[in-house]
Image (spheres, grey):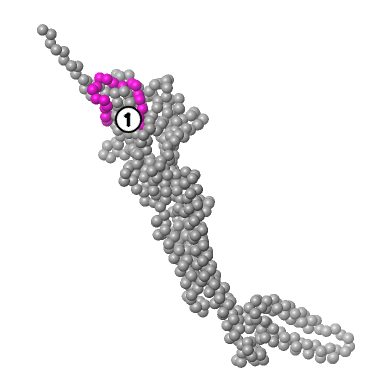
Amino acid sequence: MKLPSRAAKPPSPSDFLDKLMGRTSGYDARIRPNFKGPPVNVTCNLFINSFGSITETTMDYRLNVFLRQQWNDPRLAYKEYPDDSLDLDPSMLDSIWKPDLFFANEKGANFHEVTTDNKLLRIFQNGNVLYSIRLTLTLSCPMDLKNFPMDSQMCIMQLESFGYTMNDLIFEWLDIGAVQVADDLTLPQFVLNEEIGLGYCTKQYNTGKFTCIEVKFYLERQMGYYLIQMYIPSLLTVILSWVSFWINMDAAPARVGLGITTVLTMTTQSSGSRASLPKVSYVKAIDIWMAVCLLFVFAALLEYAAVNFVSRQHKEFFRLRKKLKEQQQRQRTQGSGDSKAKGNNTSGNSAPHGNVAQQCSVCSREEELAQQGLLFQSFGIALSAGSAPEMDATPVFADLPPGLGFYEIRRRFVDRAKRIDTISRAVFPMSFLMFNVLYWLTYKVLRYEDLQAAQ
């Protein structure tokens, strides 16, 4: 009687692994699969666990990813073990060959070892190998900040082979779901677009041609923070500087103090807006806004200087009239003295040189006064002696005709100064409104459409 044959007992996991990749298996981790044959195709995919810390000053970004690589190693194919795949301990990674992948634009990176090494190794029956690792990366991201803070940035991640040329190793993206993003992923200042660009960036060096793949992340900045911290405060500061147009021109301490305060406030805000940005050579959108706001508050301060100057011109007018009368009186006195001297000097002697020099100085002074008088002719006030103001308390104005008194002339200058304030109340807000329309139309509509077309 023949006994039924017993099924072959599968080997123990330890014996199987020793036979598969142990010292007695003949497997050499230093040699790539298909050595001297076709290149190894490594399929990559990413899972983005977190994305943040986008820094403009250093132009980089930080993210936490699960990097997964899959390739086929015929030396690891098996049939003796019943399971379709084997999940092995990360320590077994040192026993097999792995691609020499590195991040070409990496500034810093670190592995995770809490509570154990965050690595996964899985081997399939057909020899496919799945290698997954968790990484935190700091990658370079050159930024164009011309439209800051209404800009959109494109940050790239490049995965490249360090030592194997394309004759030995080729990277490629997974056909479906090459880059996955966590559902609860949020960024403090940016919105990560769902559209992610995948491509190739093969590198040619002196040592050969190396495989490279890249992924492009499109980030759109949210400007809510900058509206609250920069735009609205600077807008209110500019509006506050216009309050001086309604303050009496005689209140010099109030108007000067308000003007200087707004100028210093705008200077501080402008410096704060540049503190968190790199020292780039081009002009950013926030720079234009801050510069124009500073220009407006400074112009409001200069406006009061003009108002104060015009309102005090009547004093200069009277000072010049007084000097002109003194010069005319001096000329009459010198003229009568010269005629007497001419009658007494009948011997043919020439006139004294001192009188000639004095007359020349009088002529030059009259010319200077005539030039200064052009300023007052623009106000409709002549600087002639016949139209001098009347002021009973001062002998200089005692012989002036009635009708154009001191207060009448002063009122003309004060009205002109008040007119400057009245015009400024309309010109400053309208100019700032036109600048706002042009500014927001340019950066939020026109340039945004250009950036979207470029991407």
Reply above or below: 266 against 455.
below
The segment highlighted magenta reads 69-89
Q: Secondary structure at mark 1?
A: strand
Q: Please, what is the three-letter code of the amino acid marked with disc 1?
A: Leu
Does the stretch in magenta take in 82? yes
In the rendered structure, the answer to whether residue 287 lies left or right of residue 389 reads left
Q: Residue furthest right?
A: 347
What is the x, y in percent for residue 152?
Answer: 45, 48
Q: Nearer the viewer, residue 271 or 7?
A: 7
Reply above or below: 254 against 88.
below
The residue at the point 33 percent across, 26 percent down is 128
The quadrant where residue 342 appears: bottom right
Reply above or below: 14 against 280.
above
Does the stretch in magenta take in 275? no
In the rendered structure, the answer to whether residue 287 lies left or right of residue 44 reads right
What is the x, y in percent for residue 20?
Answer: 29, 21
